[in-house]
Amino acid sequence: MKLLTHNFLSSRFLKNVTTGYPLKLTIEEKNVVEAEVDVNFLKNIMVKIDYAVLYDVAKSIGEDENLPSPDATIDLDSLNKEQLNKLHRVLVCVDVVVGALECPETGRVFPIRDGIPNLLVNEDEVS
Amino acid sequence: MLPTPSYRLTDQQKESVYDPAEDSFLLMDAIESELEVIKSSSPLIALEIGIGSGVISAFLAKSLPSVSLLSLGTDVNRDACEAATTTARKNGVRVEVVRCDLASAFLSRLAESIDILLFNPPYVPTDEMEVDASDLSRCWAGGARGISTLQRLLPQVTELLRIGGLFYVVALKENGIDQLLKHNERLRGSIVMERRAGIEYLYILKFERIL
């Protein structure tokens, strides 16, 4: 699971959960999959990204160095190459192989195994 | 003609993951025929529900080499999630797979953000009991009229698609095509392709969110 995907997941489908976001990520094993930087993709996808959440999760796994600060609005055109590369790395290269996601409201844990997060729950857990 | 993505199901996966068949090929043919329409909509995020072997998502991603697409897929079956991940890797494309029911895990954050939604649902009319009977029957058993699972997704389609977003879905004549096409006034339904395959008469329906 890429951190990009983490940014789009929530546990709002659970009973009695109002936002279920962001899910708390813990990592036991990660992988870095090198890929070419696609500036066009970064530009487009950044519009959809909750950057504060991305920054926090990157920081929690020690990947915040060179990442643009979450305090200012991010203008991709003004980022230097290092920052762009870092953003790219954090969004699409870092791959969580083993770990867990936790619902911020209920504490329900969703395991990540072989890179696949499991957010399938029992029928009596959904609203 | 674009080739079918290469894939290989392990023996374990074969027991519960749908092996691509006529319906899958028809959906790929329909995607190919729609490529210009899809391209001109400048898609950013594609989501396939019930991704199974992963060939459809891999096909879409491979068909759009010039488009920077984020491909997401879900499946309730763990073996399918793994198969789809392997298929994506085998074909050199990126597909992020999440195990969940329909689009549940993405519904809140990606509301009105999906550009391309794909679904090859279990469409064969069966007894309702069969819908969740086993992993493999879950791939095809659609309950009464064959639309039990599709009917659970339909109310979410307008929540997921952005305006102008496209939803492609496989359907069977017995599913009630006319009714499906007109099920929601915010979605403009049309038939992209139809084909007889053995005893089945298959359709690929397209819904564009217009409101």
Image: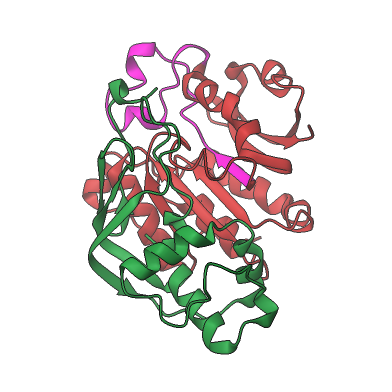
Chain colours: A green, B red
Residue A117: x percent and y percent? 32, 50
Residue B161 located within the stretch drawn in magenta: no
State the residue at coordinates (33%, 41%): A119
Residue A24: x percent and y percent? 32, 52
Q: Is residue B6 visible?
A: no
Q: Is residue A99 above or below residue B104?
A: below
Which one is nearer the viewer's eye here, B63 or A13? A13
Which one is nearer the viewer's eye here, B100 or B38? B100
Residue B85, located in which quarter of the rendered image?
bottom left
Q: Main secondary structure of the magenta part?
A: loop
With B39 as the anchor, is B98 left or right in this view? left
State the residue at coordinates (38%, 71%): A94
Residue B200: x percent and y percent? 55, 26
Which corner quadrant holds the N terminus of chain A?
A: bottom left
Q: Which residues are magenta?
A: B116-145
Which one is nearer the viewer's eye here, B208 or A38? A38
State the residue at coordinates (57%, 29%): B156
With B161 as the anchor, is A20 left or right in this view? left
Residue reaching furthest to the front: A71
Q: Is residue A73 visible?
A: yes
Residue B180: x percent and y percent? 67, 21
Q: Is residue B210 above or below residue B37?
A: above
